[in-house]
Amino acid sequence: MTNRIRSKIARGSAELAILALLAEESLYGFEIAKQIEDKTGGALRFNLASLYPMLYELEKRGWVKGRWETNRAGRDRRYYSLTPKGKRKLAPLRREWRFFFRALDRLAGVSHA
Amino acid sequence: MRNWNALVRERLGELGLKAVQQEEIIAELAGHLEDVFKALQAQGLFESDASARALEEVGDWGVLARMLHRAKREEGNMNQRTKSVWLPGVISLVVASPFLMILEKVGVRPHIWGPSGFGLAIPLPWLIAQPAFGALGAYLSLHAGGDRRARLVAGLFPSLVLFGAFCLVLVMSVFVDWSVLASIRFVGFAIYICFWVVLPGLALLLGALPFLKQQKAAVLAGN
């Protein structure tokens, strides 16, 4: 697998992870990274350098929207929420990934590995 | 206590964005580093260790600055719609139109459709070639990451342009020549649309169909 393909897959899965999380609640960057790491048992991990460029990309596409709010600790943080456009995008994204994993499973039996 | 804002500002340098955007990014990244730092301290790390570990989140500041600039800057001239709809559509049209001219040049006789006096002449080889043009438009759109609607529009683009042109001619004809009865004008228009838009459109759709069914995930790895 070339680096280009790997990077495409990583990028796509990261987008899905962020959108799926934000579909449940509004979160700020640190919370997004922490929840993704916790919920995937550490399999997926975002650091600052990988998270924010992606969040800004998603915001530019109009899929998420950032808004400054004060968190529980009294600090100003930029909370991200899913826009109606992002909500519409999530379902087809889920379908595409399901399709992709099924195809991969048929080919390599990854779900039984 | 470390001043994370000052640290991020210094290390990130000038991003080449609007001042408001740059300040917002600095505040957001500083907040993130502060949260990581505090979480590490809560795990029992000393301040210096926690600070160093928090900074490992960034890695190369130069790379981060470039990524942030790319992510935040306004879309260039070629946005996603241009890449996935307009460009594939225009390419398909540009390939399809000269083909019709070439057929005329080489003397291909148009096929007469419908009863005599009421039919229209369409070069049959041109109609037969339409699925290839539809396939070309839809394929290029798929390759550019177009969703199903973008692929459909790109595939049908030559017919859509022709439809637009006929509509324009119809509107102009009303102003140019009042003497023709509206009913005759519209019947003529409907026939033209049927033979030069609907029929080729169906042929284009036939060619585009395989690329409409294809899921984007199938080309995910190949893109």
Image (cartoon, coloured by chain):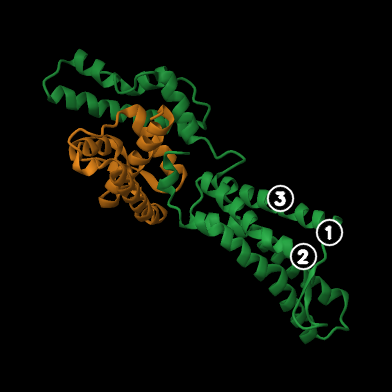
Chain colours: A orange, B green
Q: Write down the quadrant of residue B192 in the picture.
A: bottom right
| Identity, as a three-letter code, of the amino acid under mark 2 | Pro
Q: Which residue is mark 2?
A: B123
Return the mark for residue B95: 3
| Label 1 in the same subunit as label 3 | yes
* Marks 1 and 2, how far apart at CA: 8 Å
Q: Residues within 10 Å of mark 1 (few under 14, many from 20)?
A: few
Q: Is residue B20 visible?
A: no
What distance separates the C-alpha of mark 1 from that of mark 3? 15 Å
Q: Which numbered tag is attached to residue B104?
A: 1
Residue B90 position in % (x across, y down): 67, 50
Asked whether the residues under the numbered discs 1 and 2 touch, taking CB atoms below 8 Å apart as contact, a structural biologist would say: yes
Where is residue B137? Give x, y as percent.
60, 52
Q: Residue furthest left?
A: B44
Q: Quadrant of the N terminus of chain A?
A: top left
Residue B116 image offset from top left, x and y in percent = 81, 83
Label 3, label 2: how many angstroms apart (C-alpha)?
A: 16 Å
Tell me if B15 is positioned left or right of A87 in this view: right
Is B165 left or right of A10, judged from the image as shown?
Answer: right
Q: Which numbered disc, 3 or 2, marks the residue closer to the eye?
A: 2
Using the image, name the chain to which the residue with label 1 belongs: B
Type of the residue with mark 1? Glu
